[in-house]
């Protein structure tokens, strides 16, 4: 009787222990991240910003339904990440996954229509089904609502019909950064001030439409006339100089120089040569020549020189060329246009981390020169099959009648975009008369021969990178989209917009948020040839070996049982 009671008590103790463990597990969630790149660990910056979320935060992800494998993987990763966020602030954060063709509550409007109205760009895919092929529209977006704020974020930056595993992997690596950036904008809504210079022929027409639309979401953008204002105010976090066409005066250069000395940040997109695609619409050739902007000595002092040449690359965009037919009815074919190079990110800095191809037009090369105390980082450079074309250069559409001679494209990694960081020395050190220094100080800013804090400049040797095309039918197009390829199989929106935003974010935002861009997810793919060679061996190990263990265990168990009861 005593043994029976002890036996029952042991079972009750075991059941009680299981109940306590399950109850504690429902309250306390703990995970151990064993991945090398800490894939399932959120950064300290994210944890800190979640502590400031003091109201209900709703996240709706539009990755639900019958999705292609790549986007299903992205949906699973998004779910895992949002679950991590919820565990850090369970009371405030809620999330759901819905299909874009779901109707908005109380209306007959589908979410996909609302998403398009908010600026979302769907991805049209062709997927394989039992009946054959089926067209599938995917909206890889998340809609975040917090208090009176609403923000749509893209979970996938590519828009190609061919989805690669690398692109999905990059999207997963960038996920925390995109959500963190949105949360930070909710909690700290003040926008940095950015000055757009227009005193030297910088474009302010329809070509800047997408630039304006892109920046106004996160920045307060003001046009600024350097020539008419006595100085560039320190209230501006960044001074943008985009494709100037008129020469800079010494007075204007002095204002730029002193703004930098006071810790200001400068973002330049400069064409040193006058070479425009529009000119080729009127005649089949043009001569590229120096604009003579009078910026060479200023940039040289800071550590770079924009050369008066053109970068030609075999890795380039397409252009339609007349290859036959009558003069009245020519036959066009899309060919590579070596003057439209595509720059692949080297992933060597936060700005170009996980960045796609950036499209350029008539780009100049950049040389870095010695500048004491300045760190230089190449952000964009040419491919391994490129060359420089000296000026004055004759650019002709007839060049594409013959295939480019690969033997001429032997140069590689020609720099076209450089980041300069450090304590800069003024171009005008020991060069200004005392009365000019006095006039500078009268406007409220002392003349500085050296920057008293670390400053930053990004110099890009192409002004067209951040400008957009305009179509007669479609109007202004997104930057990075070639209007000649719209509606064709060659249509692709390059990462020009992302490069611009990354550059501005690095110059203005909190470094803790920027650092979250550095998160990596290493893609560990199986060696397909090795898998094929060792297929039978691993099938035997994974299927045959467990069965063999079961058979051996059963035989040994029966043998012991037989021996025991026989005895």
Image (tube, rainbow, N blue to C red):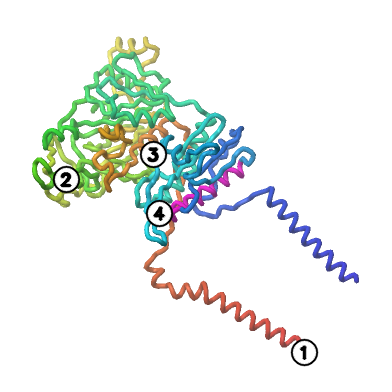
Q: Residue at x 76, y 58 (%)?
A: 17
Q: Nearer the viewer, residue 366 or 142?
A: 142
Image height of 288 relative to 10, above or below: above
If you read the primary sequence from the N terminus, does the residue marked by circle 2 or circle 1 appear first?
2
Q: Residue furthest front?
A: 108
Q: Are marks 2 and 4 in contact (CB under 8 Å)?
A: no
79 part of magenta stretch: yes
Q: Which residue is mark 1?
A: 567
Q: Nearer the viewer, residue 284 or 508?
A: 284
If you read the primary sequence from the N terminus, does the residue marked by circle 4 or circle 1 appear first?
4
How far apart are the alpha carbons under marks 3 and 4?
A: 22 Å
Q: Residue at x 30, y 12 (%)?
A: 436
Q: Foreground mark, 3 or 4?
A: 4
Q: Secondary structure at mark 3?
A: loop
If you read the primary sequence from the N terminus, does the residue marked by circle 3 or circle 4 appear first?
4
Quadrant where the N terminus sits is: bottom right
> Which portion, as a residue range, is magenta?
67-88
Q: Which residue is mark 3?
A: 351
Q: Is residue 52 visible?
A: yes
Q: Which residue is mark 4?
A: 165
Q: Residue at x 48, y 47 (%)?
A: 63
How far apart are the alpha carbons under marks 3 and 2?
A: 38 Å
Q: Mark 2, residues whose alpha carbon is within 10 Å: few (<14), some, or many (≥20)?
A: few
If you read the primary sequence from the N terminus, does the residue marked by circle 3 or circle 2 appear first?
2
Q: Foreground mark, 4 or 1?
A: 4
Q: Position of residue 260 (x, y in %)?
A: 36, 24
Image height of 420 relative to 333, above or below: above
Q: Is residue 452 visible?
A: no
Q: Foreground mark, 3 or 2?
A: 2
Q: Residue furthest left?
A: 327
């Amino acid at each position: 009787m005593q043994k029976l009671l002890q036996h029952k008590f042991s079972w009750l103790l075991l059941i009680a222990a299981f109940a306590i463990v399950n109850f504690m597990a429902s309250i306390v969630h703990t995970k151990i991240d064993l991945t090398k790149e800490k894939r399932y660990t959120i950064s300290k910056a994210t944890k800190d910003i979640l502590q400031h979320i003091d109201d209900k935060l709703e996240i709706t992800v539009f990755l639900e339904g019958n999705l292609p494998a790549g986007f299903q993987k992205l949906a699973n990763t998004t779910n895992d990440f949002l679950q991590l966020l919820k565990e850090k602030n369970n009371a405030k954060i809620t999330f759901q996954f819905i299909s874009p063709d779901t109707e908005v509550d109380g209306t007959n409007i589908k979410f996909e229509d609302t998403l398009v109205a908010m600026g979302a760009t769907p991805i049209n895919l062709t997927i394989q089904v039992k009946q054959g092929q089926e067209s599938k529209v995917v909206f890889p977006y998340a809609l975040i609502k917090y208090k009176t704020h609403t923000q749509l974020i893209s979970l996938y930056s590519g828009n190609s019909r061919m989805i690669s595993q690398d692109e999905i992997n990059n999207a997963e690596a960038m996920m925390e950064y995109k959500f963190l950036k949105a949360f930070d904008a909710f909690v700290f809504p003040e926008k940095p001030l950015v000055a757009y210079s227009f005193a030297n022929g910088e474009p302010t027409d329809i070509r800047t439409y997408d630039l304006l639309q892109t920046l106004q979401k996160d920045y307060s953008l003001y046009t600024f006339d350097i020539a008419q204002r006595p100085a560039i105010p320190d209230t501006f976090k960044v001074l943008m100089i985009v494709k100037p066409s008129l020469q800079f005066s010494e007075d204007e250069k002095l204002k730029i120089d002193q703004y930098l000395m006071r810790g200001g940040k400068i973002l330049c997109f400069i064409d040193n040569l006058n070479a425009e695609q529009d000119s080729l619409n009127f005649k089949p050739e043009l001569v590229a020549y120096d604009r003579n902007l009078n910026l060479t000595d200023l940039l040289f002092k800071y550590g770079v020189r924009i050369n008066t040449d053109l970068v030609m690359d075999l890795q380039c965009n397409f252009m339609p060329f007349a290859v036959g037919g009558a003069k009245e009815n020519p036959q066009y074919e899309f060919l590579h246009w070596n003057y439209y190079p595509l720059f692949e990110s080297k992933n060597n800095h936060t700005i170009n981390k996980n960045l796609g191809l950036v499209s350029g037009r008539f780009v100049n090369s950049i040389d870095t020169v010695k500048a004491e105390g300045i760190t230089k980082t190449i952000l964009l450079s040419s491919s391994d099959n490129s060359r420089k074309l000296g000026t004055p250069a004759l650019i002709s559409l007839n060049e594409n009648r013959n295939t480019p001679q690969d033997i001429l494209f032997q140069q590689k990694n020609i720099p076209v975009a450089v980041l300069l960081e450090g304590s800069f020395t003024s171009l005008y050190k020991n060069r200004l008369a005392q009365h000019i220094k006095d006039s500078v100080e009268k406007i409220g800013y002392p003349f500085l021969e050296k920057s008293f804090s670390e400053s930053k400049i990004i110099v890009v040797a192409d002004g067209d990178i951040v400008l957009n095309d305009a179509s007669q039918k479609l109007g202004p197009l997104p930057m990075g989209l070639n209007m000649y390829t719209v509606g064709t199989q060659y249509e692709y929106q390059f990462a020009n917009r992302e490069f611009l935003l990354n550059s501005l974010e690095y110059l203005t935002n909190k470094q803790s948020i920027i650092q979250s861009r550095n998160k990596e997810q290493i893609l560990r793919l199986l060696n397909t040839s090795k898998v094929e060679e060792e297929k039978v061996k691993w099938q035997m190990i994974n299927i045959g070996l467990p069965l063999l263990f079961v058979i051996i265990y059963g035989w040994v168990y029966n043998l012991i049982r037989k021996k025991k009861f026989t005895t």
